[in-house]
Each structure stands twice: as structure tokens, then as C-alpha cells.
Image (cartoon, coloured by chain):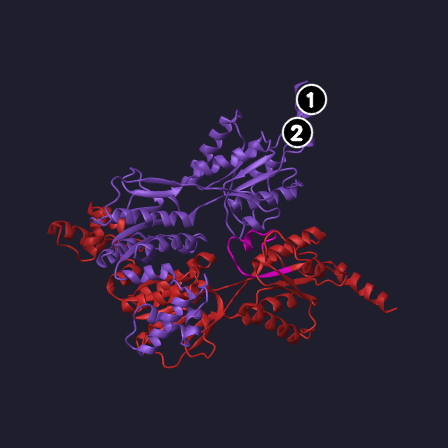
Chain colours: A purple, B red
Amino acid sequence: MSEEPAQTARLKDVAARAGVSSTTASLILNDKTDAFPEQTVRRVKDAARQLGYRPNRLAQSLRRQRSHSIGLISDDIASTPFAGAMIRGAQEAAWKAGHVLLLIDTEGEADVERAALETMLDRKVDGLVYARMYHQVLEPPHPIGNVPLVMLDARAPDNSVSSVVPDESGGTRSAIEHLVESGHTRIGFVQTLDEVQAASERLAAFRTTLADAGLPGDDAPIAYDPLLPGSTSADVVNMLDGPDRPTAIFCFNDLTAHNVYKVARQLGHRIPQDLSVVGFDNQETVAPWLDPGLTTVQLPHYEMGRWAVEHLEQIIAGEADEPVQFRMPCPLVIRDSVALPSEERRGGNTMRRKEDDE
Amino acid sequence: MSEEPAQTARLKDVAARAGVSSTTASLILNDKTDAFPEQTVRRVKDAARQLGYRPNRLAQSLRRQRSHSIGLISDDIASTPFAGAMIRGAQEAAWKAGHVLLLIDTEGEADVERAALETMLDRKVDGLVYARMYHQVLEPPHPIGNVPLVMLDARAPDNSVSSVVPDESGGTRSAIEHLVESGHTRIGFVQTLDEVQAASERLAAFRTTLADAGLPGDDAPIAYDPLLPGSTSADVVNMLDGPDRPTAIFCFNDLTAHNVYKVARQLGHRIPQDLSVVGFDNQETVAPWLDPGLTTVQLPHYEMGRWAVEHLEQIIAGEADEPVQFRMPCPLVIRDSVALPSEERRGGNTMRRKEDDE
């Protein structure tokens, strides 16, 4: 045979060349050859060699040590569009290490969580991931004996357990620096009313970054939005309505930004010409669909899921000494909602200020 | 003791009354009493009885038969915000029957799917749910021997396996009937370019429902939208721009509706005064956040997940004879995007038509 191996040969190509079904080809290539005539086995193996077929690496890992598992306990996967990405990242890392992922969602019930833990421990999981669906600081589960544990999108108050959470500060810093570099000096923050970890960390980083840029951090305008669909916060309207209004708004998340878009439209401000807006989350059903597309900070759910299990596998392998608190970078995703503040508006405001002084 | 049992007593109430930790209370109430002094055991059990404490039913189920499991194979959970609701519905039904749910997502790779099946069968799952993340018609997995199987958001072309999919026709019918009852006679459809099962079933039901209402179904205006964020389909602009334009639009899904909102805004049509819009999906980060809130058809992911496992449990228990093909109802969720067509527009169009005839 003189053919060159194709880089992209798939299982069905092998099966077609050997004249067998994909199932037969899969079984034979995974050395389950007992049920087949020797001739068929040879034909499939020849076809695989000729086509340069390589079995999918994830599939191989999944087959390797299939009696071993890692448990992932989540609290409310139905509440967030990010759950799938987190689970997928965790699963891929588990497979690479030859582990299957056993998932139990507790629906936020403490009693169910206890039962989930008992179930996982009875099944002798090799390790546990304790996940939250948004960034939280909370006590690790107990008792879990000597089972290795990593917290995902959550961390223990005393840092006693390895954890991965989003780098809220770093993400906020890149958003605010982007606005400052675009020429903005009056930057406001539309904040959630929920007292969550992300809210306090983003607010602190918002202030620090402004101060580092020589702008007033502690006096920067803050408006609160209850994050309800269909209702416009009077606080947000007030902030966007005055003559000295900010030229740029940093929003707690993409849905807050959607509300800011609505208020801006009602007030006749064009985005980005009259008002620049940055969000947080990069929700794929929200940020790119807004008009204009929203510049926002990415929450790295897939990456956090993967890190949690990769680190857990290190603990299981005895390669991790001390608990690690990892903050996953949150990259800025640039779309079309940020522009230079218009000369007119800057001029107009400067004029007005002088008049006030007179 | 003369106290009345409280209906809402929780584990922590019992623990507080008995003066122990919640963990201790949980262990004792689950008959893991070995490690505790007899006095503590009695104190916890007394407190539970006095408060009328009932352990969480799901937690009890989860503890009951924890060696038994059901496998759920999904294809791409990171691709959709609906995955969590589907898994949660499946998990709740599994727990009620004393099964733990073992989840493997194949990331859409055929070879990984084979490995997932082998893993599930090696672990002797009591049944399998074969799930897709959007409505598909496809061959069931094989070989799986005698393991009971239900397809979720997917069905076999020959109906040989029990399945649950959304009732696309019923959902479409309620949307169109709502528009007709609101007084609309010129109703257009903004359709996806993807050739998916939902698209063909919704289009067929759109035409049939119009015809049943005495309106032209086959000649109703259809525009195609590539469903890309940030780009406006010229086809949609054309449909919404003419003098005889539809007064109401049925959209393939909520993101299509978001694009229709943008086009309407560009053309100066107010929703719902000038144009009524109905979507499909009821995505919680989209439909209620649009301005005005989008009337849309709910995709019943939680309910489908629950049905799939409930039916699987019936098969496992020997209570199901023939394969069942179930279409889960898709209820209409009414918000603010539909109104009576304005008298002006109806009058204007009638006038214009008469002039054309002259």
C-alpha cells in the first residue's frame, strides 16, 4: 500500500475501509476481539494502521481506570447557565487522570448535602470537589476523613483547603484600566444589592484601580440595581441623568449592563458615543447579543472546573504539600460598548462647571 | 412536654434544642449512633420528636439504596444554559427511587460515547438515560444489552425506545393562537437557518395553526435569521420594513426575538404598539430582560429530565410494556411584547391596498 496516512482519520473511516460497523471497529481497536473472526480483526487493524487512526485520547482515558471515581458535589446547578462549563472542565481533567466524575447536586439543602457526602464516601471516591455555583466563602464539608478535597468557586475562611475562585480583583482592574486608557475620568459603578463575595471584591478593586490611576476612588459614583428584569432602578436613572454624569459605567454583571442599556436608551444616551459600558460574566446569551455588543470580563468557569480536578489529582498522587488558594484570571473580552468620551460632552461639562463656580 | 410540633422544624433546630452540632444530629437521626453516648442519642431523638422533625425526603431516598445507580449520558452540557435544569429533574426522580445519578458528558464525540457506555455498563447501572442538549431524532446507543433505556430531548426514528421531547407543535400553536386572539391577521415567522428538528416542527405547526384560524398558512411571510449575535439579517429587515409588513412576529427562539427587537428599534417600530413579538425557550437570562419583557414559549427541560427518569424507573420495575413517545407540553409565558394591532396601522394598510387596486 502506498497511501499516506490521513491526519484526520476517524473511527468511521476505519470501519468503512474494513467493511465493518463502527461498533465492531471500536470493540476490536479496544482489544475486545474475542467475538470476531481473526480475519475481521486483522482487516480492522490493517485499516487503522493504513489510515493512521488514533483513538480519541479522552475515550482512552475513560476506559483506562474505570473503577475509580471523583465526586463532585454542587449546590444548585439548575440556577446558573455556567454549570455546564464548570462540570465539563472538571470531567475532562478527571478523565485525563483515569477517573470518572460522580455528580450530586444538593439543590442547596444541607441535609441532602450530608447524604451526598455519605454516598460519595461509601462509594470510596478517590477525591472530592465541593463546588458552588457562584463565588462563596464557606466552611468545607465535614466529616470526610482523609479523602482529598478541593473547593471550586468557593473557599474556606481559614484557607485550610485548596480552592479556586475567580480573580475578581484582577478582572475588575483590567476593566477599569481599559476605561481609563480609553480616556474616561468619570467612571461609575452599578452594583448589585446582593451582599455576595463578588460584589465586595469588585467594589474594592474598582476603588483601588481608580486611585492608582490618580482618580478619586472613594468618591466615585455608585448606584445600586436590584437586578430584577423589567424594572429600572431609580438610583441608576439618577446616576445617568445628571449633567456631571459618568462617561463610563462598570456594571456588576452582564444583566446589570442590560439594565443600564435600557436606562441609557430611555434617557437618549447612545452607547458607546455618549456612554461607555463594561459588564462582568461574559454570558454567551447576553453579552454578544446586546446592541452594541458588550465589552465584559469573562468568568472562567471551564478553567476553574479543570483546575479544581487537576489539583485534586495532584493531592491524590501525593504531589501537593500545602493547601493552595488559586485565583483564576478573568480576561477582558472587548466588543463595541467602550469608546473615547466625546469631545462635546467633555467640553459641555467643563463649561457648566465653570458657570457653577462663578 | 406540652409544645405543639412545628411544621417547619429543621435539622439545625433539632441540633440546637439537643445542644449538639448539626453533623451529630444528622448522624444520630440516620441511626449512626455508635460513636455517641446513649444520653446524647436520647437527647437528639427526643428533640426531633418534640419538634416534629421530618428528615428531608430527598436526603432519605439518597441514603436508601446508595449502591444503585442510573447512568445519564449527555452530549454537550457546556453548550446550553438548559443543562442544569434537565440534570436536576433527572436527579430528583432518581433519588425518589433510591438511585444515584452517574453523569458522563461525551462532548459530542462518538468515541467518547462508546467509552461512556462501556463505563456505565461495567458499573452495572440499573438503567440509562441518553440525553441530547437540543431536540434530535437519532439512533439509540448500542450495544447496551438488556439495560433499560430512555431517550431525553431525543427520540429514535423507529420509536423503538421510550423518549421525551418538547411538544414543539403544541407550544407553537399556543403562541400563534395567542396572536390571533389578540387580533393579528398578518403574522410572520423569523426562522433559524439551522436545519434542526425544532425548526421544521415549529414551521409546520405555524402554518397549520394559521390555516385553522382561516388565515393563509402556506403564504405567511417567513424570514431567515442566521442567529449570529451583532449581525442583522437583511431578510428580517425586509420583512419588517414594507407597508404590508406583519403586525406580529413568531420567532424561532428568544435570541432570534432579541434580534427582531434590534431591527424593530432601527426601523422605529415600537414593541408591542407597532409590532407584537413572541419567542421560544423562555431563557431566564434573555426573555424577562428584554424591553419590553418577551412573551415566549417555555422549553420544559426540568420536566423532561424528571419524566425520563420516572419512566426509566417504571421500566426497571417492570411496569412499562411498550415504548412510550412522550411530548412534554410547552406552556406559553405571557409578558409584555404582544398587544392589539393599532387601529392606525390597520387603517393605513387598508387604505394603501385600495389605492394599489385603483
Mark 2 highlights which residue?
A: A346
Q: Does the rendering let one see residue B328?
A: no
Q: Quadrant of residue A194?
A: top left
Q: Residues within 10 Å of mark 2 (few under 14, many from 20)?
A: few
Which part of the image, by quadrant, shows the C terminus of chain A? top right
User: What residue do we see at 13% from left, 51% from top?
Assistant: B35
Q: Quadrant of residue B173?
A: bottom right
Of the image marks 1 and 2, the number of the one nearer the N terminus: 2
> Residue B184 in the image: x percent, y percent?
68, 66
> Residue A195 in the image: x percent, y percent?
42, 40
Is residue B196 depicted above or below A70 in this figure? Answer: below
User: What residue do we see at 31% from left, 38% from top?
Assistant: A157
Q: Does the rendering let one see residue B18?
A: yes
Marks 2 and 1: in contact by CB < 8 Å? no
Which residue is situated farthest in the front direction here?
A2
The stretch in magenta equals: B277-293
Residue B166 located left or right of residue B161: right
Q: Amino acid at mark 1?
A: Glu
> Residue B120 in the image: x percent, y percent?
31, 67
- Residue nearer the viewer, B238 or B275: B238
Residue B125 located left or right of residue B327: left
Which residue is situated farthest in the bottom direction here?
B321
Residue B280 among magenta residues: yes
Circles 1 and 2 on the same chain:
yes
| Protein chain holding label 2 | A
Mark 1 highlights which residue?
A: A355
Disc 2 element = helix
